[in-house]
Image (spheres, rainbow, N blue to C red):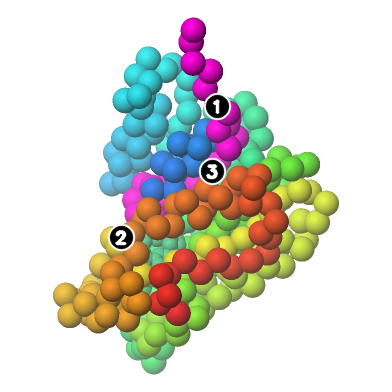
Amino acid sequence: MAAVEATKPLQDRVAIITGASRGIGRAVAHHVASLGAKVVLNYTSSSSSSHANLLAAEINNPRSAPSSHHLRAVSFQADVSDPAHVVALFDHAEQTFQTQPHILIHVAGVVDSKYPTLSNTAVEDFDSTFNVNTRGTFLCCREAANRLVRGGGGRIICFSSSLVGALRPGYSAYAASKAAVETMIKILAKELKGTGITANCVAPGPIATDMFFAGKTEEIIQRVIDECPLSRLGETKDVSPIVGFLASDAGEWINGQVIRANGGYV
Ligand code: NAP
């Protein structure tokens, strides 16, 4: 007798994941796909298209089911700070899977890897940080608020940072750009009353990704590790299950919250 496959928590729900080519977004995309979601993998730089395409291929042809012909993942290049690109990203999700998306997981973000004090922050660097982190979140959330499925299971999950709490020197623009994200999401959750869509932020502490290592010496990295009660950096797999839970029906009662996932860093 053929085994009946159990229904997965996100079975056939369409999830748009921004910043899915690398780091946390990539791990999150893999995880929500393993929970049954069909995924749209966003990235921005042309050099990352091969990473995103490879991830889509892995999800479409898992080793456990090599004969599956159903499309479960596509990649899509879009700059989240560009309004037309964000519209195109949602259009692509709808056209590919022929349904409204249930879930936006907005992970894309940047940090100024010079880690300047406020007094040394160039206007261009301040603007580019806010453009991607804050304006990008606004644009993606606005599109999601208008286009996600209503009536249950709609989820908006954005990314802040535990630096909003840790307030380390060198991160004034970055932490401020994320503080704005937290405020937007808390208000958005209230404005979505009646839609069944929840809105939350995940705010990781230090996670071993390209973003974390950029511009840091071994000594600085060790200093960060020493500040972590669990004596290690976070890994992307420490974050993805939290996002998966928030995206699921079981996560519905968490709404308008900022979930700090940092091993006790702050
Ligand atoms: P990462 O490894 O540097 O990856 C960043 C991702 O964002 C990449 O997929 C990148 O795409 C994408 N991206 C950047 N600018 C974009 C834009 N304008 N439009 C679309 N996509 C864009 O970063 P990460 O460490 O995984 O960080 C993910 C999120 O977690 C960020 O929001 C970050 O602020 C937050 N966070 C990270 C840490 C940490 O320690 N790592 C801690 C707290 C919070 P390309 O590959 O095309 O460049």
| Segment tinted magenta in the rendering | 1-26
Amino acid type at image mark 2: Thr
Residue receiving disc 2: 209
Task: Determine if the C-beta at disc 1 is less than 8 A from ligand 1.
Answer: no
Q: Does residue 91 show up? A: no
Residue situated in front as seen by the camera: 87 or 169: 169
Whether pointer 3 and pointer 1 mark residues with C-beta atoms closer than 8 Å, the reply is no
Q: Quadrant of the C terminus?
A: bottom left
**In the rendered structure, are the residues bearing label 2 and label 1 in contact, judged by CB atoms less than 8 Å apart?**
no
- Please tell me whether mark 3 sits on a helix, a strand or a loop: strand
Residue extending farthest to the left is 218
Residue furthest to the right: 194
Neighbor class of circle 1 (other Cα within 10 Å; few <14, some 14-19, many 20+) is few
**Label disc, if present, on residue 16 of the rendered structure:** 3
Mark 2 Cβ and ligand 1 under 8 Å apart = yes
- Pick the residue in front: 47 or 191: 191
Give the crowd class for mark 3: few <14, some 14-19, many >=20 residues within 10 Å: many
Q: Residue 109 is drawn in which quadrant?
A: bottom left
Q: Residue at x 44, y 52 (%)?
A: 240
For the residue pair 242 and 84, the one nearer the viewer reads as 242
Using the image, tell me which numbered label, if any, was put on residue 6.
1
- Position of 155 with respect to 60 (left or right) is right
Secondary element under disc 2, as helix, strand or loop, is loop
Is residue 62 covered in magenta?
no
How far apart in space, not on screen, are marks 2 and 1 (Cα)? Answer: 33 Å
Amino acid type at circle 1 is Ala
User: Residue 99: horizontal and vertical position, in percent?
Assistant: 65, 30
